[in-house]
Image (spheres, rainbow, N blue to C red):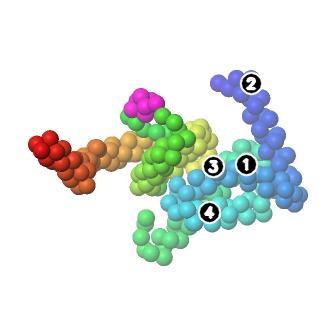
């Protein structure tokens, strides 16, 4: 059951959305620019998760925005404006995937995994250090790579629920699927992602503190040099 405070906040959001939508429908491009800046990051990540390509995601987002601007008078406030925009973005992305599949005759879709958090918590570090920035970049690249490998249906649900932190109800509205389906796909996506990352870490463990090659040669040479010096 929603509390009075929650319903009040929802009403305020709806009123704000309706106000912006009316201004845009009347041709206020400054209001539309404000809308895009407000939702750009979340909608782009949604498109990127669906299409798995930076340039395609950017193009899809732009086309969805154009469609939104031209059809803004259709927004009635039955849902949040972000939810309405999300549907447009996803429809554009899915349309592109279908067109690509037809052309190629091929049907090609974070919260950090729990097992990573304890090890991360034990490390005291300067997050602004260059090496830490590089490490975060590498971890992010690994997560994005493994997320891209998830089947489309699971990947999109995961992004909406875990990354964008949308509710089950909002996700179901965006994708036009039952809430039970959202829950099952999200659970399955997390399981597949966790398993995939675990496999990657298992492979990486074999190379932790690697001691071959140049380092090995250097140690041997230094020890032999010291022995020679001591013998003399």
Indicate the position of residue 217 as horizontal and vertical percent values.
Answer: 21, 53
Residue at 30% over, 47% down:
204
Q: For label 4, count other residues whose C-alpha is less than 10 Å away and answer few (under 14), some (14-19) or many (20+).
A: some
Q: Quadrant of residue 8?
A: top right
**Left or right of 210 on screen, residue 165:** right
According to the picture, the residue beneath numbered tag 3 turns out to be: 42
Q: Nearer the viewer, residue 107 or 115?
A: 115
Magenta segment: 117-124
Secondary structure state at the residue bearing disc 4: helix
Q: For label 1, count other residues whose C-alpha is less than 10 Å away and answer few (under 14), some (14-19) or many (20+).
A: few
Q: CA distance from mark 2 to mark 1?
A: 23 Å
**Left or right of 85 on screen, residue 215:** left
According to the picture, the residue beneath numbered tag 4 turns out to be: 58
Give the label on residue 38, or none: 1
Residue at 52% over, 51% down:
156
Q: For label 3, count other residues whose C-alpha is less than 10 Å away and answer few (under 14), some (14-19) or many (20+).
A: some
Secondary structure state at the residue bearing disc 3: helix
According to the picture, the residue beneath numbered tag 2 turns out to be: 5
């Amino acid at each position: 059951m929603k509390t009075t405070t929650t319903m009040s906040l929802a009403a305020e959001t709806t009123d704000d959305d309706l106000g912006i939508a009316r201004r845009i429908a009347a041709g206020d491009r400054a209001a539309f620019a404000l809308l895009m800046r407000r939702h750009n990051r979340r909608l782009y990540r949604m498109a990127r998760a669906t299409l798995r390509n930076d340039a395609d995601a950017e193009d899809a987002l732009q086309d969805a925005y154009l469609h939104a601007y031209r059809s803004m008078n259709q927004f009635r406030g039955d849902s949040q404006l972000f939810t309405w925009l999300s549907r447009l973005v996803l429809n554009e992305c899915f349309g592109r995937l279908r067109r690509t599949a037809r052309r190629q005759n091929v049907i090609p879709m974070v919260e950090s995994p729990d097992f990573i958090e304890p090890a991360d918590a034990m490390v005291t570090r300067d997050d602004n250090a260059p090496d830490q920035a590089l490490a975060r970049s590498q971890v992010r690249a690994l997560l994005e790579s493994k997320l891209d490998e998830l089947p489309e249906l699971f990947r999109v649900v995961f992004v909406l629920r875990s990354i964008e932190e949308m509710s089950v109800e909002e996700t179901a509205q965006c994708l036009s699927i039952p809430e039970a389906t959202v829950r099952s796909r999200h659970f399955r996506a997390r399981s597949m992602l966790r398993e995939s990352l675990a496999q990657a870490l298992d492979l990486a463990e074999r190379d932790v503190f690697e001691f071959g090659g140049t380092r090995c040669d250097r140690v041997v040479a230094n020890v032999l040099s010291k022995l020679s010096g001591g013998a003399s």
